[in-house]
Amino acid sequence: MGVIQYTEAHVRLLARLIRAEAEGEGNLGMLMVGNVGVNRVRADCLDFIQLRSIQNMVFQSPGGFEAIQKGYFYQRARQSEIDLARKVIKGQRYHPATNSLWFFRPDGSCPAQWYNQWNSGRFKSHCFYHPTQQDCPRVF
């Protein structure tokens, strides 16, 4: 059972997304990107109102992921990435992405805020940002 509803197709879709967004960050970086995706489905707040599935989250426009615009995203997921996707769907969370809804890769250091959201930390190249508990209680 997962913290969000999912199908096997959703697991594979999330696996492709986490690989395309963060393969260079290793397994932990991919897990964190997965946390952000699952959090967006759970959130029902701010930029992520009425996202009801992994598919809605992955292909959200505007506000979705850059990786879906690249051919690498459309390659089949490997078993290792499928296993990582299952972990985050089942509720495992990894700091600093624990409650995050956004991440990006800056040229320098992480700004304290990004689009009025607070930085929760950095992992390798990615900075993670979370809403307040008041704005998005379902993420906490």
Image (cartoon, grey):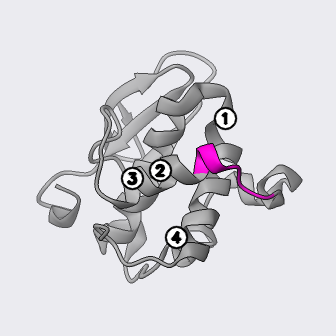
Task: Categorize mark 1 by other alpha carbons within 10 Å: few (<14), some (14-19), many (20+).
Answer: some
Mark 1 and mark 3: span between their CA atoms?
A: 16 Å
Q: Is residue 66 visible to the viewer in this orientation of the structure? A: yes
Which mark is on residue 88? 3
Which is nearer the eye, 58 or 102?
58
| Three-letter code, disc 4 | Met
Mark 2: secondary structure: helix
Mark 2 touches mark 4? (CB < 8 Å): no
Which label is found at residue 23? 1
Q: Which residues are magenta?
A: 76-81
Q: Callout 1, which amino acid?
A: Glu
53 with respect to 23 (left or right)? left
Secondary structure type for disc 4: helix
Residue 5 location (% of width, % of height) = 37, 78
Q: Nearer the viewer, residue 95 or 106?
A: 95
Question: If you read the primary sequence from the N terminus, does the residue marked by circle 1 or circle 4 appear first?
Answer: 1
Residue 110 at what x, y percent from top left?
A: 45, 23
Q: Secondary structure at mark 3?
A: helix
Residue type highlighted by circle 3? Val
Residue 95 is situated, as x and y percent measured from the top left of the image, at: 30, 32
The answer to whether residue 18 is visible is no
| Residue 100 in the image: above or below residue 15 | above
> On the image, numbered disc 4 is attached to which residue?
57
Q: Are marks 2 and 3 in contact (CB under 8 Å)?
A: yes
Tell me which numbered mark, 2 or 4, is placed earlier along the sequence: 2
Q: Residues within 10 Å of mark 2 (few under 14, many from 20)?
A: many
Q: Amino acid at mark 2?
A: Gly
Residue that appears at 36% across and 41% down: 129
